[in-house]
C-alpha cells in the first residue's frame, strides 16, 4: 500500500508539472524544506539513539568505495571511448547517489523510519564527496578556484551540522511531544520528495536517450549494487543492514551533483536524462534488489 502511495505522489507531481500548476519556484521551496528542515530533523531524531559500532562504518565505507569505483570505470577503463565532459558527468552521476531524495522515502517504505540514521550516514558521506571531490572536479574542468567555497559549503551544510550536533546529544534529551513532531516532519519528507521527483520527470524525461545514459545507469543501478550485495554476503552482515546498504547503493544519480553540473553547463541533456531516468528506473530496480 505504501509503495502505491509513493507511485501516486510521483504521478501527482508529474501531472501538476505537465499542467503548469507546479512551477520551479514551488519546487525550490520544497528543496529548501527538505534540506533545511526535514533532513536535519532526521539526524536529530534518530542519531542520538544509535549505538556506535563497527556496523556504522559500513555506511561510510560503501559510498566512498562506490565513488572510487565509478572514477576507475569512467576515467580509466572507458576513457578512450568517452569525451572529457562525458567522463566527468558519468563519473559523478554514477558515483554519487540520490540517497536522501529518493533513498529516504524508500527506506521508510521498506524498513521503517528507525533505519533512517543509517541512510543519513550514507547520505552525508555522499554529500561530503560531492561537495569536496565532486565540486573540485567540476571546478577543474571550468578553470575556477573553488577551494574556499567548497570548505564553507561542507561545514555549513544543514544536515552536516545536524549530524555533528546529534552525535553529541544524549538519547533521552527530547520529550515524547517533540519526538512526535519530529516524526510528522520525517513523514512529510516522503510526500515532498516524491512530488518533486514527479515534477522533474515531467520536465526532463524524453525519448530516446544515448548510450551514455545506458552506461551510467547500468553501473549505478545494476553493477554497483551487485558488487555491494556480494561483498555483504562475504562479510556476513545482518540481513536488514545489508539490504539498507544495497538499497542506498541502487539509487538514482544524486540531485545535488546533477544541479551543479547543470549550473556549469556540463552536457545538460545527458545530465537531465541520467537524473530523471535514474529516478524512474530506481523505483523498480530497488524493488527487485529487495527481493534477494
Image (cartoon, rainbow, N blue to C red):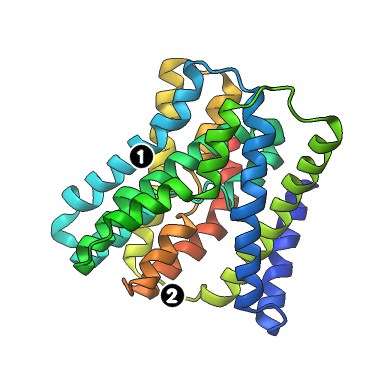
Mark earlier in primary sequence (2, 1): 1
The quarter of the displayed image where residue 60 is located: top left
Residue at position x 33%, y 71% in the image? 264
Label 1 crowding class (10 Å Cα cut-off): few <14, some 14-19, many 20+? many
In front: 284, or 175? 175
Q: What residue occupies the far right of the structure in this picture? A: 177
Residue 75 location in percent, x, y?
A: 20, 52
Residue at which label 1 appears: 66
Q: Quadrant of the C terminus?
A: top right
The quarter of the displayed image where residue 128 is located: top left
Residue at which label 2 appears: 208
132 left or right of 282?
left
Residue at position x 32%, y 64% in the image? 212
Q: Is residue 190 visible?
A: yes
Label 2 crowding class (10 Å Cα cut-off): few <14, some 14-19, many 20+? few
Decide: is 97 above or below 24: above
Residue at position x 47%, y 49% in the image? 156
Amino acid at each position: 500500500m505504501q509503495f502505491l502511495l509513493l507511485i501516486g505522489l510521483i504521478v501527482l507531481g508529474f501531472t501538476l508539472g505537465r499542467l503548469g500548476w507546479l512551477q520551479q519556484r514551488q519546487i525550490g521551496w520544497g528543496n529548501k524544506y527538505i534540506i533545511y528542515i526535514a533532513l536535519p530533523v532526521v539526524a536529530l531524531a534518530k542519531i542520538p539513539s544509535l549505538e556506535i559500532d563497527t556496523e556504522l562504518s559500513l555506511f561510510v565505507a560503501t559510498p566512498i568505495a562506490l565513488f572510487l569505483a565509478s572514477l576507475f570505470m569512467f576515467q580509466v577503463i572507458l576513457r578512450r571511448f568517452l569525451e572529457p565532459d562525458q567522463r566527468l558527468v558519468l563519473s559523478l552521476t554514477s558515483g554519487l547517489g540520490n540517497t536522501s531524495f529518493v533513498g529516504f522515502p524508500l527506506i521508510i517504505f521498506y524498513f521503517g523510519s528507525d533505519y533512517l540514521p543509517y541512510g543519513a550516514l550514507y547520505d552525508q558521506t555522499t554529500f561530503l564527496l560531492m561537495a569536496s571531490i565532486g565540486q573540485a572536479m567540476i571546478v577543474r574542468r571550468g578553470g575556477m578556484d573553488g577551494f574556499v567555497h567548497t570548505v564553507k559549503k561542507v561545514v555549513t551544510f544543514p544536515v552536516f551540522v545536524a549530524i555533528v550536533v546529534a552525535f553529541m546529544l544524549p538519547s533521552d534529551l527530547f520529550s515524547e511531544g517533540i519526538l512526535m513532531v519530529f516524526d510528522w516532519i520525517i513523514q512529510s519528507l516522503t510526500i515532498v520528495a516524491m512530488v518533486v521527483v514527479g515534477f522533474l520527470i515531467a520536465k526532463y524525461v524524453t525519448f530516446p536517450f544515448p548510450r551514455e545514459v545506458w552506461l551510467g545507469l547500468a553501473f549505478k543501478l545494476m553493477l554497483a549494487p551487485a558488487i555491494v550485495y556480494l561483498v555483504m554476503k562475504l562479510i556476513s552482515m545482518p540481513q536488514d543492514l545489508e539490504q539498507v546498504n544495497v538499497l542506498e547503493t541502487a539509487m538514482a544519480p544524486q540531485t545535488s551533483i546533477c544541479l551543479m553540473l547543470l549550473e556549469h553547463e556540463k552536457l545538460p541533456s545527458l545530465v537531465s536524462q541520467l537524473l530523471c531516468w535514474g529516478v524512474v528506473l530506481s523505483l523498480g530496480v530497488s524493488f527487485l534488489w529487495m527481493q534477494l
